[in-house]
Image (cartoon, rainbow, N blue to C red):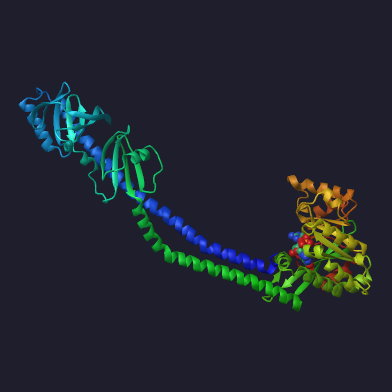
Amino acid sequence: MIKARYIPIAAAAALGVAALLLPVWIGWSWSWQRTLSEERGELNRVGAQVAYQGHAILRQAAETLRYFQQLRLPPCSDAHIARMRASTIGTRMVDEIGYYRDGRLACNTWGRVGETVMLEAAFTLVEPNLQLRAASFSLASPAARMIGLYSRGHYVYIEPGRFVDVPLEGDVQVAVFSVAGDPIVGRNEPDWAAARRVAGGARAHDDQRLFSALTDRDFKIVVSTPMARVQARLRHERLALLPLSLLAWALALAAIATWLGRRLSQVGELRTALVRGDLAVHYQPIVELHTGRCRGAEALVRWRHPSGRWIAPDEFIPLAERHGMAGRITRHVLRTVLADMGAMLRADAQLHIALNLSPQDMRDGVALDTLSATLAGTGVACRQIWLEATERGFMDVDAARLAMARARQRGHVVAIDDFGTGYSSLSYLQALPLDVLKIDKSFVDKIGTDSASSTVINHIIEMARSLRLMMVAEGIETQEQADWLRRHEVVLGQGWLFARAMPAQDFIAFLREREYAGLQPEAALSGG
Ligand SMILES: Nc1nc2c(ncn2[C@@H]2O[C@@H]3COP(=O)(O)O[C@H]4[C@@H](O)[C@H](n5cnc6c(=O)[nH]c(N)nc65)O[C@@H]4COP(=O)(O)O[C@H]3[C@H]2O)c(=O)[nH]1
């Protein structure tokens, strides 16, 4: 088993590794996402340029076709052919115009023809007020393949390359489809099958290429770049990130070192405090709720830190438990209580002091032996020393039962503290040799409120009564709470309504002052 003192070191080592790896991991995935999004941004820009170009072509083609529809000239007359030629020369994106009759090209920009032209595929492009049918044509030679846009007898031909005539990096590929998915034109020999998959919504990158797809009214445009280019950019990005990562590492390491240093020094300081006796014990009066008389006190340890600050037990007891010092603290408190209160306890046999036992005390039973040895011959009766164990102390039920049984045999009063905040149940309580049940402050706080948990205290009181346990209510702050508890036959109580925890001398003065008068609830005294 790992020794408790090594736990913070192991935790810090694990944290250190995590702190070193975390910035690397964050930087790694952040740079990858950033590179991807930047590359995609560039591909999107290319796609948008191609779309813009395509729409400009469609617009010019549509205007040309509309012009020839309105022209009332005999088809393939000299005047008609002359207009076709003039239009071709005067329209930047139209490369040729033709007139079709009975499925044959009758004439075009260059004169009368009368030949059959191969139609590769036809698809419809949408242009308001004009239905455009586009088709690929093979003219005399395959090299002269054109995109033709048709409307009522006339075709305008466009060089396919015009659709993708945008500035491009050498290895960027473009594939243009109609919205129906027919390929129109590509640049840099795109992988049509992959581009079609991406245009249909498939994943936007594979091992080979990163894709970006754009769909608008007339086109689906897929642009891609090789993954090798993305990787090269990523390497550059990560190199630029290196100083930042190193800085993050350095900061993380410094934070861990500071934390560890503080942690280890706090453990060391606590050890020294135990040796030097810098742990003080304060006493919080426990009063009889019916009479207001003080019947005893709970001993609460405090640490006077070298900085002058008082440290509350909630802060250092868990640390002491983790580092195996809880038993030493209990022994220190025991000795201090006997030194502080021995005379008072001998003088008043009804007076008691309640001590807190740690889970470690419950397990090893050393505290009990020390207590017996310390009490021997002092004249203080065992029943004047109450022992409080929290629910955490009952984790090992058998050890706890044994420790409590031994304590009761010797005459001590045994109490369960913070009852109801953990996992205790009636059956659990039945199994333990107990005398007193301390009702936790969290339940006392609910008295007089409408909250759903305000009734829990009734069940706790019922449970304690059925087990014949004496009850002590903790954390009483208002008169209303004290009255309610009294009406419900809770015998003893402690809380700021009566007094805060205070140094031994103050508690002795407090006891003397109220010995005969009975304690009246009043505002807090000093300490805490
Ligand atoms: N807000 C409010 N608080 C009130 C009121 N009345 C009492 N308290 C506080 O409630 C705590 C009661 O002690 P606990 O439940 O045994 O809870 C104790 C106990 O579990 C532990 N502890 C204290 N001394 C020792 C010790 O010597 N050994 C061990 N193992 N644990 C100790 O530390 C816990 C906290 O102790 P403290 O800080 O002294 O806090 C004390 C006390 O000052 C009130 O009316 N209002």
Q: Quadrant of residue 372?
A: bottom right
Is residue 20 positioned above or below 194 on the image?
below
Q: Quadrant of the C terminus?
A: bottom right
Q: Quadrant of the N terminus?
A: bottom right
Q: Quadrant of residue 235?
A: bottom left
Left or right relative to 244: residue 379 = right
Tell me the residue at 9%/30% (across/down).
83
Q: Quadrant of ligand 1?
A: bottom right
Is residue 185 positioned above or below 104 on the image?
below
Extreme-bottom residue of the structure: 276
Tell me the residue at 90%/58% (across/down).
291
Tell me the residue at 30%/36% (across/down).
177
Extreme-top residue of the structure: 102
Find residue 488 and report its horizontal and vertical position in percent: 86, 49
Left or right relative to 292: residue 314 = left
Q: Which of the two residues, 34 or 146, is positioned nearer the viewer here?
A: 146
Is residue 64 positioned above or below 21 on the image?
above
Q: Which of the two residues, 454 or 426, is positioned nearer the viewer here?
A: 426
Does residue 200 show up? yes
Left or right relative to 22: residue 121 = left
Q: Which of the two residues, 87 or 295, is positioned nearer the viewer here?
A: 87
Is residue 225 positioned above or below 261 on the image?
above
Does residue 293 show up? no
Find residue 61 and report its horizontal and vertical position in percent: 19, 33
Extreme-left residue of the structure: 78
Q: How many marks?
A: 0
Find residue 347 and report its horizontal and vertical position in percent: 94, 71
Find residue 437 and report its horizontal and vertical position in percent: 84, 55
